Amino acid sequence: MPPASVSGTDAPALQRGILRRWSLRAPVRVEIDANATLVQRVLAARGLTGDAERFLHPSLTHLHPPSDIPGIDTAAERVLAAARAREPIAIYGDYDVDGVAATTILYRTIRALEPDAPVRTYIPHRVDEGYGLNDDAIRQLADEGVRVIITVDCGITAIEPARVARSRGVDLIITDHHNPGDTLPEAFALVHPRLPGGAYPFGDLCGAGVAYKLAWRLTTMHAGGERLPQPLRDLLLDLLPIGALAAIADVVPLLGENRVITHAGLRRIRSSPFVGLRALIDASGFGDDKVDSERVAFSLAPRLNACGRMGHAREAVELLTTDDPAVAERIADRLTRQNKERQDVERRITAQAEELAHTRGMTRTDTRAIVLSHPDWHTGVVGIACARLVERFARPVILMRTESGACHGSGRSVRGFSLHGALRECGSHLESFGGHEMAAGLRLRESALDAFTAAFVEHANRRIAPDDLVLDLDYDCDASIDELQLGAVRELERLAPFGHDNPPVALRLIAIRVAREPRRMGDRGRHLSLSVRGAEPKEIRLVAWNWGDKADRLRPGMTIDAVVRPKLNHWNGTTSVEAELLDVCVKRSGAG
């Protein structure tokens, strides 16, 4: 049986481990039957008991009709009319995975419906043009004869570009998922799941999800009804893996329709008919291993993002739209090299920023934010470096590139500190900014950097206490080692795909003992293998990544609490249960 505290009502709200501050994941305490199975307790902790079957068995029948999205029928009618009349169409996407995926979905759909339609793609350059629609691109496309522009993953705040499009006689169709502003652009059609006055039941679609809904509506409108011919049914199924890539990479909640699309897409990703997607998987070196959300997030998505950060994201679009295996293989190999370059640049920026932060006193408890700018830093990579420093110092971080008298870059935040709100408070020092609570971009004059830094740090110091300079670790519920059986862990895996708002299951093991001397493993002994046992004689192996330097703190016989992530280990034809160690709280030493 699990410990009594699994009910969630008598477990401590906070506990400090070696690395982090632990909290129950449930936003409010929930009563959980002590006789409930492990998966039932995890579902209860996540507020999913009333919808457990639907959650554990996501189905494409759970998707809402695309016509429920405001503006989608008007958009589909115009796109089909333009394709049939051979009016030039441009799909204007963002340079990240979501924008690339959304561009791919609409391009392949229009080409499948009207093979001779003059449809093209346009992705702005991250550094030269920046995010979103821009006036010059609209004018260029209009000069080249484009009559319909469809935006994906951008445009809902593009007031002036929409005016330019209208003045040039271009019908602008905006499909987006970002927050609308107080004023909406004057476009031919706005397709957005959260438009004011709309009633679409799921507002958290990523940009590719919105594009997928438009693609779906294009096919039914083209077919004259909901019953699609087999080639169009197959097309919509084949596009699901592209939507899954976007939902995972864009860190939207993997719940509701995003969960359905991602679940179905990952199941089909290995059998995709798109040679570019298969080449991307091959270049990632997975072999025959399953492609899950973790592999997408840490291998496939970074490769697709790398060309947007280090070069031009149009190569990623070409990869996913080409039907030439040789072209696909060549691009996939180049994206792999660019990703390696991006990793090298990221490590260099992170190391430089960490040293500067120490030198300037920004890692002390009296300075609870980091703001730095450097002329050698790459604007396409500073955001990732920010995330690394947040993990290291548990405070908001802003890193920028200094160039031509201006500083521009990105920021990342910690739970409970709104980065967008902080930038708004310091807006008098900025030329522009945008984003949300946890991530944002900004631009300011170099001459304003010192004043902005002082204002931002002062704002952070007011809202972050010294005791809060530690990252949080959420766990779902308590469990015993004896519960971690093959069947139970397989049940927990049914909660996948994991991602934002549906993270991998984390369990707290209370009062377990270190069974024997921890064993260092991996390159230069960076990692640990740790055997533990509870009240029962059963032992389980914990793997602690990058814990090699903590081996001396975990001695045989010690009593510890641990937060772990249970996993199935497949090796030499056998399957066993082990767990990834996330953090420990040392209770006392013992005789072993």
Image (tube, rainbow, N blue to C red):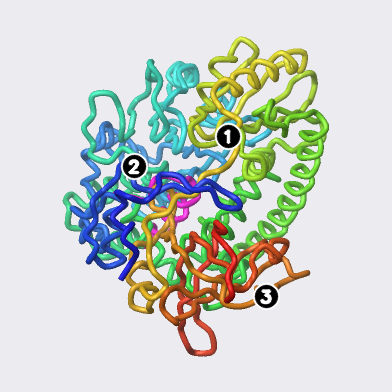
Percent from the top left, x then y, of residue 463?
A: 54, 23
Q: Residue at x 48, y 68 (%)?
A: 512
The part of the image, by quadrant, that contains residue 510 is bottom left
Residue 312 visible from this viewpoint: no
Q: Are marks 1 and 2 in contact (CB under 8 Å)?
A: no
Percent from the top left, x then y, of residue 152?
A: 44, 38
Percent from the top left, x then y, of residue 379?
A: 70, 35
Q: Between residues 345 and 478, which one lies in front from this camera angle?
A: 478
Q: Are marks 1 and 3 in contact (CB under 8 Å)?
A: no
**Under tag 3, what secondary structure?**
strand
Closer to the eye: label 1 or 2: 1
Mark carried by residue 467: 1
Q: Earlier in the sequence, mark 3 or mark 2?
A: 2
Q: Earlier in the sequence, mark 1 or mark 2?
A: 2
Mark carried by residue 519: 3
**Circle 2 sits on which residue?**
27
User: Does residue 252 show up magenta in the picture?
Assistant: yes
The part of the image, by quadrant, that contains residue 350 is top right
Closer to the eye: label 1 or 3: 1
Q: Is residue 264 left or right of residue 95?
A: left
Disc 3: CA contacts within 10 A as few (<14), some (14-19) or many (>=20):
some
Q: Between residues 109 and 440, which one lies in front from this camera angle?
A: 440
Q: Give the residue type at disc 3.
A: Arg
Extent of the magenta region: 238-256
Label 1 vs label 2: CA separation? 21 Å
Disc 1: CA contacts within 10 A as few (<14), some (14-19) or many (>=20):
few
Q: Between residues 427 and 244, which one lies in front from this camera angle?
A: 427
**Under tag 1, what secondary structure?**
helix
Closer to the eye: label 3 or 2: 3
Q: Residue at x 31, y 60 (%)?
A: 4
